[in-house]
Image: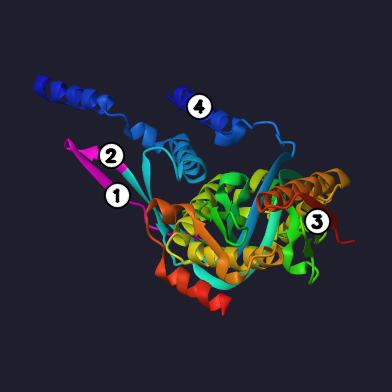
Amino acid sequence: MKRTLLIITTILLGVLLTGCSKNAQKSPIEVAMPMINNCSKLHTAQYNVHKILTYEDMTAIEGSLFFEKISIPIPGERKLVIPIDATIQAYIDFSQITKENINVDSEGKKVTITLPNPQIVLSSAKIDYKNEKQYLSWNRSKFSNEEKENFLRQGRASILASMANSDIIDRSRVNAFKTLQPILVAAGFSPENITVTFSDEIEKNKHSEGIIKQLSIIED
Amino acid sequence: MALTNKSTTKKRQSRNKNFVTDEMVRSPWFWVGLVILGLIYFFFLRDSGNEKKKATIDETPTCITSIKEIAEWEFLTLQIEEFVDTTVNKKLSSAQAVKIYKGTARLGINTKKANKNWIVCEGEKATITLPEIELLDKSIIDDTQTRTFYETGTISATVKEKMLQSAKKKMKATALQKENIAIAEENAKTEFKNIFTALGYKTVQISFKK
């Protein structure tokens, strides 16, 4: 019996010493070469945002008792807080504009420019490392880097999704007009003869009253 | 007598059938094994195996801290990855970290920096003086996409900040190479030429503010 126990103990010690780490396999460092893209994007609105990402996980041991599935929660907390500052910009992609989108009347007095819909991009983000906090009970493990990275990716998507409810697109349209108007005035068109429209407004056959009002204020 | 003998042998047999016998419990090796099993659970199985995690991500509101009206025309985009490693030596321990940062450098012009009369049109000729090509968003790095390749020990917030600044510096140097600025200038010229040609100008002369 003693021999058997000794063998079991040796096996267990062997397992401990050789390690059961999940991260034993590591991929080689792959740093991509810079990707260079020619473009023509007019950035017209910038929103600086702050978001506090919070994460909490509850762990439970799952098993079955008398053919019934049971879940026993493990006491202890495991919480993470990461504050992020991000910059979101709205832009108009001028590479989608062709000669057909710029119409000058036969007299050369009136100009109508049809722009594509503004798009949103998260141009940069910064983690506030000093205020990043982990709250762990004695029986819970630290957050791994993989967990944090996955969590940050979700946070990034959440920031972009929340921007859909903001007025960044409308503001971008108005600012695009503000940028283009002086250029067109310098090109010889009087302000009242300049029309800037956006493709979705034409598609939906609606010209946002709000935008038109704002544009008239700018013209004044 | 015979009956009692039978009952004791039955008891012994049933004891032998049990996984844990009295003999085992009395042995110190049994307790050593139990402690080792406990240690295995504590160090390796705490957050894995049959345990199920219920992750909750709290959707805190995204606060808009500032809104800026900009007029920046981007003509060249560079998506850059930078590798930064650091070692911090302390009296009793050392820490090491290897991180891969992702960033987007945008080269273009800020039309708000243009001269008052940057567009002069006479007859069929348009003369445009564009502001010089610059790095539009100085922050460049999207830290939510940073990958930690290797980390041992505790890396402080200050060291993490230094690593980020180092990556940013490298990215700026890569982006602001003469060749990239030349490509951005060429793209800017093409774009403005296309716009003014569509507006009816036959000759479009474009230069950059120096």
Residue at x-position 79% and y-position 69%: B117
Assign a secondary structure to mark 2: strand
| Label 1: how many Cα within 10 Å (few below 14, some 14–19, many 20+) | few
Q: In this view, does A194 lie above or below A27?
A: below
- Quadrant in the picture for residue A43: bottom right
Q: How far apart are marks 2 and 4 (CA)?
A: 30 Å
Percent position (x, y) of residue B22? Answer: 33, 34
- Quadrant in the picture for residue B136: bottom right
Q: Mark 3 lies on which chain?
A: B
Magenta residue check for A112: no
Magenta residue check for A76: yes
Q: Do labels 2 and 1 share a chain?
A: yes
Q: Do the residues labelled 1 and 3 touch (CB within 8 Å)?
A: no
| Label 3: how many Cα within 10 Å (few below 14, some 14–19, many 20+) | many
Task: Tell which circle, 2 or 4, labels the residue nearer the N-terminal end.
Answer: 4
Tell me the residue that label 3 is attached to. Answer: B133
Task: Tell which circle, 1 or 4, labels the residue nearer the N-terminal end.
Answer: 4
Of labels 1 and 4, the one closer to you: 1
Q: Is residue B21 above or below residue A195?
A: above
Assign a secondary structure to mark 3: loop
Tell me the residue that label 1 is attached to. Answer: A72
**Left or right for A166, reference B208:** left
The residue sitting at the front extreme is: A107
Q: Are marks 3 and 2 on the same chain?
A: no
Of labels 2 and 4, the one closer to you: 2
Res A63 label: 2
